[in-house]
Image: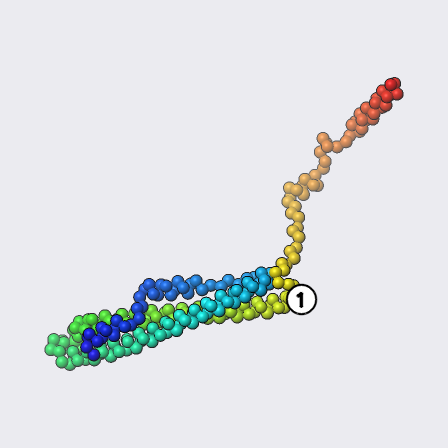
Amino acid sequence: MTTENQETEERTLPKIDQPYIDDLFEELGKMQVVLDKEPLRFGPSRLNEKIAITRNMLTRCEQLFNSVSYNLQIYTTERRRAELVFSLNEKELIANDPEVRAGRNLKDREAVAHLKLRKELENLTNLNATVHNLEIVLNMVKAKRSDLKDIQGRIKDQMKLCQEDIGIGRRWGQEKVAAPPKPIVTPKMAEELLSPIEESDTITEQDTSDDLADIDALLQSVDNY
């Protein structure tokens, strides 16, 4: 295969760069479903919405899995082809190139051959890095898919628990009866309640005598009138 044909084939490979990987990680990070602690009190529509959201995320996750797997297969195949071409060219240089054969040992000859095959070696290195990145992304997609399937199972468990709650008399949208709040009595309040009544607030015998004297004087003034 000529160099021109090789470059043409390389240009047909799907573009896998850092922005592509960043977008995938960002999209996977947004695939979050928060379960309600009391799904029964929010009504069946909210639970049905979470079922639909989880199902849609799983569908998108499967699409990403298929896409990444396809790209990984393409780059793995291309890497194997590049490794074979590089190995054949290296052996040919070691066997036939006078400059390479001038090396004192095999390592020196391989070093000179690698210098002559610098472009092919760079291409092989890039392919290895891309395959490695795709494997990491594929593992992340698998983990997210497993997490969404677990959430889907938890929602099914909540549906069963809601059915059991309905069986014992609860209804959709019904709040749990909260216990009345207990009165809070601070030490200061208790001290004030138990403290003796102040002298200024008590009715003394002198006060009673004065009140009776006032009443007698009022009655006498009425009689005189």
Look at the picture and state if 103 lies above or below 183.
below
Where residue 121 sits in the image (x, y, percent)?
22, 72
Where residue 74 sits in the image (x, y, percent)?
31, 75
Q: Secondary structure at mark 1?
A: loop
Visible in this render: residue 122?
yes
Look at the picture and state if 139 lies above or below 95.
above
User: Image point 87% across, 18% down: which residue?
Assistant: 225
Q: Is residue 92 left or right of residue 132?
A: left
Look at the picture and state if 75 lies above or below 42.
below
| Residue sticking out furthest to the front | 45
Q: 110 or 167, which lies in front? A: 167
Q: 142 or 183, which lies in front? A: 142
Q: Is residue 221 left or right of residue 105?
A: right
Report the colour scheme: rainbow
Visible in this render: residue 111?
no
The residue to which callout 1 is attached is 168
User: Image point 24% across, 79% down: which residue?
Assistant: 84
| Residue sticking out furthest to the top | 224
User: Image point 37% across, 74% down: which residue?
Assistant: 69
Q: Is residue 109 left or right of residue 10?
A: left
